[in-house]
Amino acid sequence: MAQLTKHKWLIAIAAAVIVVLAVIWIALSQASKPDRVLEKFENAVKTKDTKQLEGLIVADNPNALVNGTSLQAMIRYLKTNANSYQVVKDGIQNQIKDENYSETNQQISLVQDGKKWGFFPDYKLKVKTVHLKVTGQSDNDQLSVSIGNMKVPEKKGSHTYGPLLPGTYQTNVTVKNSLGTFFQKEKKDLWGNSEVSMIVDGSRLARKSEDVQKGILEAVRKFNQDLSVYTTSGLDANKLSNATDSFKEDFSLEQAQFEAIKDYVNEVTSQYLGSVVNMDELSINYFDSDWKAEIEALVSYNEKVKYTGEKNYEDYSYKSLCKYTLKYDKNSKTWLVDDAEDAKADGSESSAWDNKKELKQKNAPVLKWVRSGDKSDI
């Protein structure tokens, strides 16, 4: 009788084990269903939880970095691009409906990847990877790139980085060229194509650079100061110390004209009072292997002329609105004035400028040209 009872316990234990195994089997079977993969994916995006995607995401390129940074980049993109996210979900839902678990042409596909626990189909989300191609404004730009603080492989000499999981990444680019070293931070969407291009706008970076701005402002100040020297030197264009040779040639006619009339002039005085520069009009461009800049300034001068036989000076003081074109000289590493156009101003023009720099001329000297026989002295 005792032995029979013992057998009943064995039967009961065996039955319980079978029930437990059946429950586990059903639970594992349910957990392995493809719609649970979609549910887990949606929850990960909703909660921004990259942990839920670990082991669930596989890249189409085994060299792609699948980590917290790249998974966060993918979630970031999907959170801010509702249309793309909906396309991904609709594509996966259609795969589940059609029971088609092969890779599709969508950015993310639901695929069967072997067996889980040796019995159940193992479903993963296969992602098409992306490369980022970074180009500078000129062939001479030296670029250094980091993406999401990751060390991403670069195709040799091409500035093409990847493979990367698709997503929105923080890119950090260092640009070195003849003007200096500049830094660009930009969020970049890597989605939809196997290769996404990013052009580093060196002109924009140079325009925002305080060092470049200082160089241009100094060139403007120096040129305006030299104009007083030029005016009181018998209009000798060589006195324009930071003008290009081609621009100096434009002044040759003025010097010839002065030579023709200088016997009727006894004295010329000139004093540069300063200028106000309109920084909103600053533009910098790289073209035909040269860096050029354009800028506008309101300039003031005190100028007087005493004609032969006259006791008093004629006042020719003026204010002008001047637009400068400058060219960067690689050898001297300075900006040179390459052209200038001016128009008469009343002095109120700068009041309408939002972003301006005042170039004050402290203790500005009064320069003088005096006629002495056939000789001209400064």
Image (cartoon, rainbow, N blue to C red):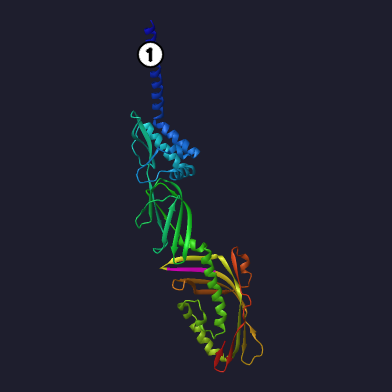
Return the x and y of residue 80 as percentages of the image width and height.
Answer: 49, 44
Q: Quadrant of the C terminus?
A: bottom right
Residue assigned mark 1: 10
Q: Position of residue 116 (x, y in %)?
A: 36, 31
Magenta: main secondary structure equals strand
Identity of the residue drawn at 39% across and 8% down: 5
- Viewer-closest of 367 and 362: 362
Q: Quadrant of residue 35?
A: top left
Label 1 residue SS: helix
Q: Which residue is at the front of the view, 308 or 302?
A: 302
Q: Which span of residues is magenta-colored?
A: 290-295
| Count of numbered circles in the view | 1
x 43%, y 53%: residue? 146
User: In this orientation, which residue lies closer to the viewer: 59 or 252?
Assistant: 59
Residue 300 falls left or right of residue 124: right
- The correct choice, above or below, for 47 with respect to 375 in the image is above
Residue lying furthest front in this view?
2
Residue 253 in the image, given as x and y percentages of width and height:
49, 84
Residue 293 magenta-highlighted = yes
* Residue 216 in magenta stretch: no
**In percent of the image, x 42 and y 40: which residue is there?**
87
286 w.r.t. 250: above or below: above
x, y percentage for residue 217? 55, 70
**Mark 1 surroundings within 10 Å by alpha-carbon count, few (fewer than 14), some (14 through 19), many (20 or more):** few
In this rendering, the answer to whether 125 lies above or below 284 is above
> Could you tell me the amino acid type at mark 1?
Leu
The quarter holding residue 269 reads bottom right
